[in-house]
Image (spheres, grey):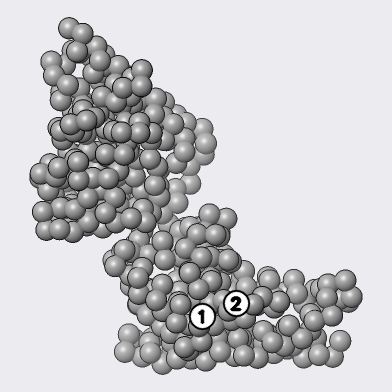
């Protein structure tokens, strides 16, 4: 019992020091290395002192734990969740095992969604390889590391990631504790909601999809289009902006032909002309949809070359900062008439399963309009 009380006092001192580090995050950029060194020292203290101490206290097993010891274990879990800094526990492959409340607010990713997925997948593409490499080095015992990365949903904001090794009780492999902190920006508090996640009810989302379906039906049933390309352009204009940042339409199946590309007016890294000049056959996602006839929904696409490369030989998904995509074949009676590819970029909310189902319904309507045009 005395050891438990002593451990509680040591843990309370650690929490106070973390609060001081939180207050020090507003120091000038030149002084940040000192603050980061202090953070690493405190993480070392957790890994080398507090965690082994906790393991000794829990060595007798849950069955023989006293009520006070069980309370201490719950306290540890509560402290992890309520730490004022964004903290994640990951394995050597960067797969998330735990993400605290501040971490969900900071990344804009719910803990339930993040668990079991690589933390590197939430970073900008150029930072993923470096983060995976540094995580592996920490896990194999090469010492603590710190590097600057960028979240995919906020690529303009640099983020300091501090990594330290940790050996959870009863597990054979070393885990890695990651602390995230914006460089020169205020870290979101546990009470503030995640910025990129909109506060919309299910009813509102359903009504928005119904409005989109109505707009698509109206566009297809209005003045008859004279060509297949005109049908695809009408459909693309309904989806552009209100539903997707980029809309790319390809006609055909065996021989794909790009007919329409609509993108953001303020996009500087990628122009619509760059995607118009692409050969659809060089876009694996489009080819697979045209051959297999199945919709592809991807959130934070792992393969940067899934939509091919632009004229500068750069991956389109990376250049356009695509955070989610839908690739939908226009199928009628098993025959593919064409393919629509939709991108959402930056902080915009990712495509949901409900939106993918609505898009699947619209794709059949578009395919029917194309088929009716052929019968004239």
316 with respect to 40 (left or right): left
Q: Secondary structure at mark 2?
A: loop
Name the disc covering residue 276, or none: none
326 with respect to 61 (left or right): left
Tell me if I can see residue 215 in this picture: no
Residue nearest the viewer, comparing 242 with 131: 131
Label 2 or label 1, whichever comes before in sequence order: 1
Considering only vertical position in the picture, is 41 above or below 130?
Answer: below
Where is the N terminus found, in terms of image quarters? Answer: bottom right
Residue highlighted by disc 2: 173
Q: Position of residue 263 (x, y in %)?
A: 20, 43
Name the disc covering residue 139, or none: 1
Q: Position of residue 5 (x, y in %)?
A: 80, 87
Residue nearest the viewer, comparing 362 with 279: 279
**Looking at the image, which residue sits at the far top?**
376
Q: Residues within 10 Å of mark 2 (few under 14, many from 20)?
A: few
Q: Position of residue 244 (x, y in %)?
A: 30, 40
Q: Secondary structure at mark 1?
A: helix
Picture quadrant where residue 227 is located: top left
Considering only vertical position in the picture, is 223 above or below 174?
Answer: above
Distance from label 2 to label 1 (Cα)?
8 Å
Residue at horizontal 81 percent and vertical 90 percent from the top: 3
């Amino acid at each position: 019992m005395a050891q438990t009380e002593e451990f509680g006092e040591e843990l309370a001192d650690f929490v106070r020091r973390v609060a001081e580090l939180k207050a020090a995050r507003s120091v000038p950029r030149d002084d940040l290395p000192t603050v980061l060194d202090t953070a690493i020292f405190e993480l070392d203290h957790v890994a080398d002192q507090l965690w082994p101490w906790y393991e000794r206290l829990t060595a007798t097993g849950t069955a023989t734990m006293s009520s006070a010891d069980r309370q201490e274990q719950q306290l540890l879990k509560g402290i992890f969740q309520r730490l004022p800094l964004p903290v994640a526990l990951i394995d050597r492959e960067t797969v998330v095992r735990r993400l605290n409340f501040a971490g969900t607010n900071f990344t804009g990713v719910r803990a339930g969604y993040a668990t079991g997925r690589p933390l590197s997948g939430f970073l900008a593409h150029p930072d993923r390889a470096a983060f995976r490499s540094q995580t592996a080095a920490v896990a194999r015992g090469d010492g603590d590391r710190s590097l600057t990365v960028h979240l995919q949903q906020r690529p303009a904001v640099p983020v300091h990631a501090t990594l330290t090794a940790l050996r959870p009780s009863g597990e054979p492999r070393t885990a890695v504790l990651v602390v995230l902190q914006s460089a020169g920006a205020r870290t979101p508090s546990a009470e503030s909601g995640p910025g990129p996640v909109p506060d919309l009810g299910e009813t509102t989302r359903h009504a928005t999809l119904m409005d989109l379906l109505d707009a698509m039906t109206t566009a297809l049933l209005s003045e008859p289009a004279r060509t297949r390309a005109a049908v695809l352009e009408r459909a693309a204009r309904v989806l552009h902006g209100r539903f997707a940042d980029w809309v790319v339409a390809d006609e055909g199946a065996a021989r794909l032909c790009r007919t329409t590309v609509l993108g953001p007016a303020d996009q500087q890294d990628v122009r619509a002309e760059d995607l118009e000049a692409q050969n659809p056959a060089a876009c694996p996602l489009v080819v697979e949809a045209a051959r297999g006839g199945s919709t592809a929904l991807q959130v934070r696409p792992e393969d940067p070359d899934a939509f091919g490369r632009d004229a500068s030989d750069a991956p389109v998904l990376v250049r356009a900062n695509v955070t989610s995509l839908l690739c939908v074949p226009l199928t009628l009676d098993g025959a593919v008439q064409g393919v629509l590819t939709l991108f959402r970029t930056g902080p915009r909310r990712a495509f949901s399963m409900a939106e993918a189902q609505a898009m699947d319904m619209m794709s059949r309507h578009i395919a029917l309009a194309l088929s009716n045009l052929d019968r004239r």
